[in-house]
Image: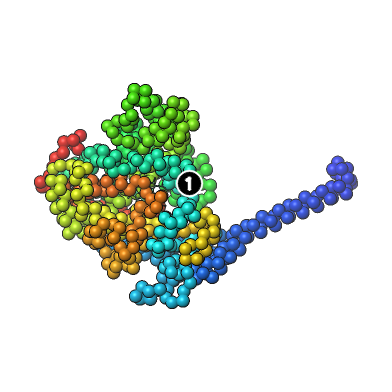
Amino acid sequence: MVEEIPMAVAAAGGWPTTWWRGAAAAAVVAWLALHVAARVADALWWRPRRLEAHFAAQGVRGPPYRFLLGSVREMVGLMAEASSKPMSPPTSHNALPRVLAFYHYWRKIYGASVDEHGSIAPALDCLSLFRPTFLIWFGPTPRLTVAEPELVREIFLTRADAFDRYEAHPVVRQLEGDGLVSLHGDKWALHRRVLTDAFYPDNLNRLVPHVGRSVAALAEKWRGMAAAAAGSGGEVEVEVDVAEWFQAVTEEAITRATFGRSYHDGRAVFALQGRLMAYASEAFRKVLVPGYRFLPTKKNWQSWKLDREIRRSLTRLIARRSHEAEEEEKAGDGDSAGGGFRDLLGAMINAGGGERKKPPTTAAAIPVEDMLEECKTFFFAGKQTTTNLLTWATVLLAMHPEWQERARREVLHVCGPDELPSKEHLPKLKTLGMIINETLRLYPPAVATIRRAKADVRLSDGCLIPRDTELLVPIMAIHHDARFWGPDAAQFNPARFAGGAATAAKHPLAFVPFGAGARMCIGQNLARLEAKLTMAVLLQRFEMRASPNYVHAPTVLMLLYPQYGAPVIFRPRSSQPSDPAAAS
Ligand code: HEM
């Protein structure tokens, strides 16, 4: 062995040089390792500790930061425990402790002290004014929870330029698409400008007959099921899980809104998108397994294949629509969506104007790739959110027969017992509007939203929020806060909205089911239209009551769901319209 050394030394250019090089390399490696270790230690330990101290100095407290995990383990534990038991009592709407269990628990411990009259405790520093504000840790990232409407105003409206939309996890982004929801800067502004017109009520009103017919078709099916149950000796009624069935209504509406006259092709694409979302939601449950979405599992293969298929179909559809738009332009016919309806895809294609003369895959105002992502976003943002609203509204009407009867009287008075509600009818359904608002207050489909400070931000009260701090706005907590809604905050009382949404609470920003400011939900008119229309058609045709199989257990998995489904019993009303169009 000993003799071999000189040979190796010779081969490497001699002892001294090799020794020197080896030592230098080792030193560099050691320095690099130390540097990386210091950076990692700083990111995972010292920085969180410094931030903790920074916030503590401003009077903001929270659960202690734990290495790497932050508050996640406790948060998951609190949420799991809360969702292990249904609501008690079962008719209660005090759902906050169950849905945002971590928030409810920590707010009691760390929220700024407030006396029993709701006054701020004296001698507190600036941020304490924004009761209840406290700090939690999403891994090593600080997350300030902010449930004070004045501060929400600053985040969403007056200082919105200082905050960015939170960057969702890649699995969530795969679900929601890289459309409006996740865009920033000029690209977001362009898309928002191009799409806004299509969401104006005058345009959406053209969807009323289509959506109305799809609800009536659903009602016909349920009537048929009730008749079949009676035929086999049961009651003339049917129990359905509305959380499942309403998906057909919302899918129809968002497909029409997105594709307009290309509805049939669009429907095929969105059917694929629905399957893709089912796979992606499964991946979402495994989100804590790093890299899971890249593993060549059978499900992942299938979802990659589906994704390719969706892209191919949408690209073909866009190419065809672009060509048609060009032909119409030549013929001087500007009505590219047909029937006067301005659909979202058409709006994006037409945004190119003169650019459209280029082949559709080259640069246009909105490139094809971005249109694809935007269509995905509409499907994600528009379908499940509205399904949840319809579900909770139906559950609440089933739980509150007095309000159900009041709403039915109004619907029968305005629309009659046989007619499908029209666009002229909808604004007259005031009670139904109040019920929908109260549903959005108690059970907001989007329970929270997150912003990230783009730079160090000093708020108007003088408090400093360091760059990259996330701000969690727990929409549901604000909606349930007795300081703004009064002592009956946890009760179902649509009458509080009799004077409109802006004045229903003590603060106009205490009701934000669709967010606020420039990034407010672009689809809220569509969601409200679908909700009013669906409820009106069902009230005309059925009496509804809660099923004994229903377990009241709202829970959150991205959105607010009924944990064990939403079975509701529908009994057809005797003076029943039979709508032949709906049955077809
Ligand atoms: C009950 C139903 C709905 C609820 C509760 C809801 C809720 C919300 C909320 C809270 C935001 C703002 C999030 C934030 O500020 O971080 C938002 C944004 C958005 N919503 Fe909705 N939404 C609903 C229906 C719809 C529908 C039908 C569409 C149809 C396309 C839609 C599309 C969007 C889009 C694209 C954004 C992002 C807007 C932007 O950043 O410019 N939503 N939604």
Image check: 530 left or right of 141?
Answer: left
Q: Image point 51% across, 56% down: which residue?
A: 453
Locate the C terminus and report the quarter of the image it occupies: top left
Quarter residue 316 falls in: top left
Image check: 439 left or right of 405?
Answer: right
Q: Nearer the viewer, residue 148 or 174?
A: 148
Q: Is residue 316 visible?
A: no
Label 1 packing within 10 angstroms: few (<14), some (14-19), many (20+): few
Q: Image point 47% across, 66% down: which residue?
A: 461
Q: Image point 52% across, 67% down: which residue?
A: 55
Please say if 110 is above or below 22. Answer: below
Residue type beneath disc 1: His
Please say if 309 is above or below 229. Answer: above
Q: Position of residue 242 (x, y in %)?
A: 27, 49
Label 1, secondary structure: give it: loop
Q: Position of residue 168 (x, y in %)?
A: 47, 50
Q: Nearer the viewer, residue 75 or 514?
A: 514
Q: Which residue is mark 1?
A: 184
Q: Is residue 144 visible?
A: yes
Q: Position of residue 415 (x, y in %)?
A: 15, 46
